[in-house]
């Protein structure tokens, strides 16, 4: 029987052809991989042998080869190898570049072979070294290290961290309170800087009470307002009983009243304190205490405020004296120097009284003075024109006529006042008229010439004042004792 030969089936379709080609391709790749592996083993063995030869030749004959113009590659080529190229060993072909290190490069630049003859790829070796140097991270903090977020902590561990943070905050707050407002703990002094004295040289000054402060401060203010007080007293206690002493001055009696007898007990730092003292001095030194005044309504009442209650005294809403209207009240004596304490006084009217003596500039040093009425008195000496306009720049009305013994020289500073009335014969330049048929006085003419302005009303008075007499109405006897004797000037 004839054997029938099996005929190969022809691909019936495209899928069978593709499958067959894939099987052939896989078979070829396996064969190639086996050949490459065998070739690689042969190359490694030859490279290991050649590295020893190259190193010895290079170390011993390097200088000699440079002089002769020979290269290291030629020397190795004489032994059957070519270094520095992709050529195969001489006399052979198809070995695939035995003198090339894996990854390229000359054999002279190759890293040393690994133990056992196996060569390491430089890139792979560097990667392995980097991995070996990486510090191991605690798995509890791995997520924090890689992503910046906590992870891998249990519930109790998180509670512990929170308690630790709260404890640190509490400790910080406690330390802040201790060192800012708590007791200061002073460290011990290792040794004294100097030997302590047996007893302090100056005893500590006790803190004054309210009454002591009022007495000391009040006496200092009154002594400043009345220099004469410095001749008689040095402490507030020395004022006690002044009104019963026939040798007391009006200032001492007034100081005793304000300091001890006055039921209002105004604090010394209150401006009303020194103003009440000035009014009391005026009462004791200018006839109020002796019964000369025609009207003394409510003056020196211990429980009454002087504002709006004492006759002729007007105050503003702050209790500061703004007007003293005592005209035609039979006031005697000099203008008290203590009037200079009325810094809010705008109107001072002492006209038509029996006052006399010189006018002290300090008595009229009132910064708010607007109207001054001193006519029909018995003042004498030089009128302080210069000092008055300097200390009272707001002055706008001045009446000083009918004081036959008063004289002085009026300056151009008074050219801007609204009203000025003087005696014709006592002041220079005399306020006489320029001519018999003129209404302009010599002073007005000079003001227009030198200052460009003149007072709106400038009167030259030629009449003599009419002496003021006291009516026969009896005055109640002084119940407070002595009125005081003015101190020697």
Image (cartoon, rainbow, N blue to C red):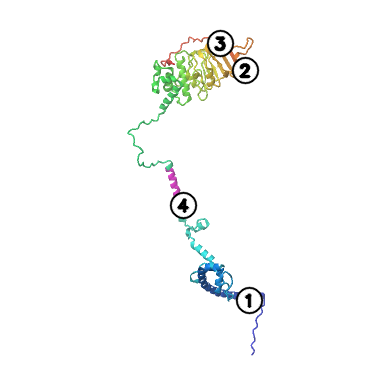
Residue farthest to the front, as pictured = 67
Give the residue pinned by disc 3. Answer: 425
Q: Nearer the viewer, mark 1 or mark 3?
A: 3
Marked residue nearer the N-terminal end (4 or 3) = 4
Residue sitting at x 48%, y 25%? 271
Residue sitting at x 47%, y 54%? 158
Marked residue nearer the N-terminal end (3 or 2) = 3
In the image, is residue 411 above or below residue 148?
above
Residue sitting at x 52%, y 65%? 125
Instruction: Bin the neighbour count of mark 4 within 10 Å (Cα to Cα): few under 14, some 14-19, many 20 and up.
Output: few
Give the residue pinned by disc 1. Answer: 20
Q: Nearer the viewer, mark 1 or mark 4?
A: 1
Element type at mark 3 = loop
Mark 1–mark 3 contact, CB under 8 Å?
Answer: no
Marked residue nearer the N-terminal end (1 or 2) = 1
Residue farthest to the left, as pictured = 198
Q: Nearer the viewer, mark 4 or mark 2?
A: 2
Residue 278 image position (x, y, % from top left): 47, 20
How far is disc 4 from disc 2 in space, using C-alphas?
94 Å
341 sits left or right of 24 in the view: left
Element type at mark 4 = helix
How far is disc 1 from disc 4 in space, using C-alphas?
69 Å
> In the image, is residue 444 part of the stretch drawn in magenta?
no
Pick the quarter of the image with the C terminus: top left
- Identify the disc placed on residue 475: none
Q: Magenta span covers which residues?
A: 158-178
> In the image, is residue 163 part of the stretch drawn in magenta?
yes
Give the residue pinned by disc 4. Answer: 162
Q: Nearer the viewer, mark 4 or mark 3?
A: 3
Residue 12 image position (x, y, % from top left): 67, 77
Give the residue pinned by disc 2. Answer: 449
């Amino acid at each position: 029987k004839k054997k029938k030969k099996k005929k190969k089936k022809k691909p019936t379709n495209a899928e069978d052809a593709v499958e067959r080609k894939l099987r052939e391709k896989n078979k070829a790749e396996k064969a190639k991989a086996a050949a490459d592996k065998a070739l690689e083993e042969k190359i490694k063995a030859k490279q290991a042998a050649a590295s020893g030869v190259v190193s010895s030749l290079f170390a011993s004959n390097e200088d000699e080869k440079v002089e002769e113009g020979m290269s290291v590659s030629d020397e190795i080529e004489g032994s059957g190898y070519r270094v520095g190229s992709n050529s195969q060993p001489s006399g052979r072909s198809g070995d695939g570049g035995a003198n090339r290190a894996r990854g390229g490069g000359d054999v002279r630049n190759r890293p040393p072979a690994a133990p056992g003859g196996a060569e390491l790829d430089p890139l792979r070796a560097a990667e392995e070294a980097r991995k070996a140097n990486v510090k191991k991270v605690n798995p509890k903090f791995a997520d924090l290290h890689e992503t910046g977020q906590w992870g891998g902590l249990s519930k109790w561990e998180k509670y512990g961290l929170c308690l630790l943070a709260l404890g640190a905050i509490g400790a910080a707050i406690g330390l802040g309170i201790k060192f800012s407002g708590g007791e200061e703990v002073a460290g011990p002094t290792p040794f004294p800087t100097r030997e302590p004295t047996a007893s302090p040289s100056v005893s500590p000054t006790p803190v004054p009470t309210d009454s002591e402060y009022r007495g000391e401060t009040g006496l200092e203010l009154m002594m400043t307002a009345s220099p004469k007080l410095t001749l008689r007293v040095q402490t507030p206690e020395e004022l006690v009983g002044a009104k019963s002493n026939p040798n007391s001055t009006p200032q001492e009696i007034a100081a005793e009243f304000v300091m001890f007898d006055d039921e209002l007990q105004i604090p010394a730092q209150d401006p009303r304190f020194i103003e009440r003292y000035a009014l009391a001095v005026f009462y004791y030194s200018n006839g109020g205490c002796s019964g000369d005044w025609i009207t003394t309504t409510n003056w020196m009442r211990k429980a009454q405020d002087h504002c709006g209650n004492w006759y002729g005294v007007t105050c503003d809403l702050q209790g500061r004296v703004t007007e003293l209207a005592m005209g035609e009240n039979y006031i005697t004596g000099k203008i008290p120097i203590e009037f200079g304490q009325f810094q809010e006084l705008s109107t001072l009217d002492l006209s038509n009284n029996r006052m006399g003596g010189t006018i002290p500039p300090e008595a009229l040093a009132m910064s708010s003075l607007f109207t001054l009425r001193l006519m029909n008195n018995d003042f004498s000496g030089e009128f302080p024109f210069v000092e008055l306009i300097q200390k009272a720049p707001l002055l706008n009305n001045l009446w000083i006529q009918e004081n036959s013994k008063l004289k002085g020289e009026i300056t151009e500073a008074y050219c801007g006042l609204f009203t000025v009335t003087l005696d014709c014969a006592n002041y220079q330049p005399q306020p006489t008229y320029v001519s018999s048929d003129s209404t302009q006085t010599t002073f007005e003419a000079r003001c227009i010439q030198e200052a460009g302005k003149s007072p709106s009303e400038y009167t030259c008075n030629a009449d003599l004042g009419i002496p003021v007499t006291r009516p026969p109405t009896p005055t109640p006897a002084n119940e407070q004792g002595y009125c005081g004797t003015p101190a020697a000037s």
